[in-house]
Image: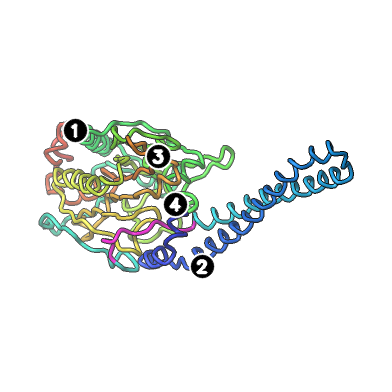
Amino acid sequence: MLNLKFIQDNPELVIEKLKRRNFDASEIVQNIIDLYSQKNKLQGQADSAKGEMNKISKEIGMLFREGKTEEANSAKARTSVLKESIKQFDVDFAEIEEKVYQLQVQLPNLPHNSVPSGKGEGDNEIVKSVGALPELEDSAIPHWELAKKYNLIDFELGVKLTGAGFPVYRGKGAQLQRALINFFLAEAAKAGYEEIQPPLLVNEASAFGTGQLPDKEGQMYHDATDNLYMIPTAEVPVTNIYRNVILDAKNLPYKNTAYSACFRREAGSYGKDVRGLNRLHQFDKVEVVQIAHPDKSYEILDEMVKHVTSLVEKLEIPYRILRLCGGDIGFTSALTFDFEVYSAAQGKWLEVSSVSNFESFQANRLKLRFREEGVKKPQLAHTLNGSALALPRIVAALLENNQTPKGIKIPKVLIPFTGFEIID
């Protein structure tokens, strides 16, 4: 959530920066300024009324002592009128604050200066591309056929049990899933992240804190009875650990990792791009989250990008890193780098990670602050997170890229976790 004072002090800058997102903020910003101008006028009237009431209150006792009963009673009647008007001012202030708040939450985060302009994913900037694209034999098949051939993933059984987008992993397919989760968590632990096992449902305050509400309300599964949301990513519960907390600057950054199942409705998803593991309603992911000092957050973003880079390189998958353009960057992010891996049998790139710096946008919603020695007022922290990694498309790329006439080879780094070298 953008800081209100910053919006008031820099309206033209806010409007101009949000244009890079193809977001026209001019009406919202102007409405916020007009409402606060209205509030300031009311505040002046309220202060005047309070001043008059204080003055009259002091005079009433003196008037009674002087025997000026009629004047004293008249003054008392005036204070009653002033009290009612002051109560009304409080009501008016609350209404204005609510209107401002409803406008404020509609504004996305300001993009970092390095975010390129663009309307969608076609305008994202490729900043790095590594690895030769695999050359498969003519008999190579996509992962959904490999999954059926080797009895790794049962998509039809998932439809029977739940519906489309809820696959059932079995045998070596389930073991591969578990191996990847354990590998990602082990690598995060080596990098100094504390592991968290979070709940899979969160309350409305948590979903709002990290920006899923109101922006992504339609993408989350919602239990209306208890007003709980199934998490779309472990980022939500993990980051909310620090909601309404004041941290000690000396302990920054805070580093957490978590494995969780993730749930996304993905309303309107259909067609060939959602076949197999390409787009699911339930999937597994390991997340890394950092709470950082504002002066260090972009150094930490680079560190997190390097961490994800090390994972895909150890899995020996061709990958590329994209800097998302203004039209493709998430609502809460200031700067995002996406990782894509190459899926040989499908002949296309698949997104497997987003690593983002939200600056103080989430922290302002979360009331997440830190106290620095010598600074009286607590400051907003910066929050960052990244997928390290999301499993479905990693599995798709591993199965497709490593298929041979003898079976599917397991990357060396995973063998200690799978206990087998080949799926045959």
Mark closest to the chain's N terminus, 4 or 3: 4
Mark closest to the chain's N terminus, 2 or 4: 4
Between tags 4 and 1, which lies in front? Answer: 4
Q: Residues within 10 Å of mark 3 (few under 14, many from 20)?
A: some
Q: From where the camera sits, is residue 409 visible?
A: yes
On whether residue 402 falls in the magenta region, the answer is no
Does residue 197 lie above or below 143 as drawn? above
Q: Amino acid at mark 4?
A: Met
Where does the image place residue 15, in percent across and percent down from the top left?
42, 66
Q: CA distance from mark 4 to mark 3?
A: 17 Å
Where does the image place residue 267, in percent across and percent down from the top left?
45, 56
Q: Which mark is residue 190?
A: 1
Q: Amino acid at mark 3?
A: Pro
Closest to the observer, 279 or 264: 264
**Residue holding disc 3:** 378
Q: How is the image coloured?
A: rainbow
Q: Write the start and end of the magenta stretch as one range.
A: 106-116
Q: Residues within 10 Å of mark 4 (few under 14, many from 20)?
A: many
Q: Which mark is residue 27?
A: 2
Mark closest to the chain's N terminus, 3 or 2: 2
